[in-house]
Amino acid sequence: MSAATTQTSERQPVLYLSHGAPPLADDTTWTGELAAWSSDLPRPSSVLIVSAHWELAPIAVSATSGDVPLLYDFWGFPQRYYEVTYDAPGAPELAQSVAGLLSGAGESLHQDPSRGLDHGAYVPLKEMFPQADIPVLQLSMPTLDPQRLFALGERLAPLRDEGVLIVGSGFTTHNLAWFNPSAPSDAAPPTPSAEFDHWAAEAVGRGDVDAVLDFLAKAPAAREAHPRTEHWAPLYVALGAASASGGVDAASVIDGFWYGLSKRSWQFA
């Protein structure tokens, strides 16, 4: 029996993953990597996920009932990608816990009862927890400001000891001009994508939070790798949640490239 099939009360790690687009489901290499990753995790009581695809202020959570449809927030794909389901239970208790942690910092939490999980949430979770039997709650990013998102992660850190798996879902490089589906999915990436990925692996690996938060000034090809920073920003929340107990212990669990984009993903102890 894998670790992910038995719920435990131990502290959960924090994840930052590159979530891909809906066709990720057709990539047997990547889906296998995500499944292997989850099999090594202690089974969480619930999942709190921050996706690059939900920016909303004031900060909000998604529907807490399990019967709200997924949000197919993409265009131009074959019909079968709009027929995917992921009927994970809602997480009303987790929403209450998040609200309590934020109110302690003088911030109120709003709820959008009509918002289902977007593809930044359900695409990777469907591969990691395919039985859809773990409650999931999505949290909006109220800003792209690195320090504010890092502080948000710090406030959420106590959830780890309640069995909550905190997940930042973005993409380690995200320049769609590099996305080349006419080439093999594992073709050599553009040089700027590779340079940024290498820098990110080293900076996150050594726990250099300051460099990661100031990546636009510190990283090579930063503005090419992220013309807009929303796919890097969930990492700030993950780092905040991971560092609240002192230091950042990072393991690069998935690496490589997918149609030119870095799919590097980390687990923080």
Image (cartoon, grey):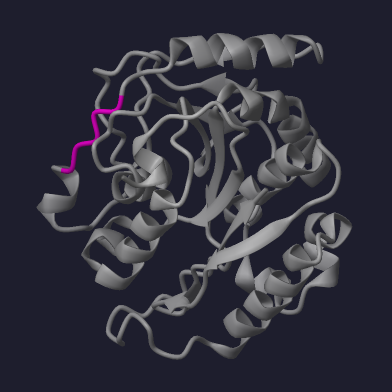
For the record, the magenta segment spans: 84-88
Q: Residue at x 27, y 33 (%)?
A: 132
Measured from the top left, where is residue 102 in percent x and y? Answer: 72, 16
The magenta stretch spans residue 87: yes
Magenta-colored segment: predominant secondary structure: loop
Q: Is residue 144 visible?
A: no
The magenta stretch spans residue 179: no
Residue furthest toward the front? 1
Q: Nearer the viewer, residue 146 or 2?
A: 2
Identify whether 24 is placed above or below 73: below
Identify whether 40 is placed above or below 185: above
Q: Is residue 164 visible?
A: yes
Measured from the top left, where is residue 214 in percent x and y? Answer: 84, 59
Question: Position of 248 compared to 141: left or right?
Answer: right
Measured from the top left, where is residue 239 in percent x and y? Answer: 73, 47
Q: Residue at x 68, y 41 (%)?
A: 237
Question: Position of 14 compared to 34: left or right?
Answer: right
Image quadrant for the N terminus? Answer: top left
Task: Specify the quadrant of the image occupied by residue 36.
Answer: bottom left
Task: Specify the quadrant of the image occupied by residue 250.
Answer: bottom right
Measured from the top left, where is residue 256 in percent x and y? Answer: 49, 77
Q: Nearer the viewer, residue 253 or 75?
A: 253
Q: Residue at x 46, y 79 (%)?
A: 260
Identify whether 26 is placed above or below 110: below
Identify whether 196 is placed above or below 90: below
Q: Residue at x 86, y 42 (%)?
A: 246
Q: Nearer the viewer, residue 40 or 190?
A: 40
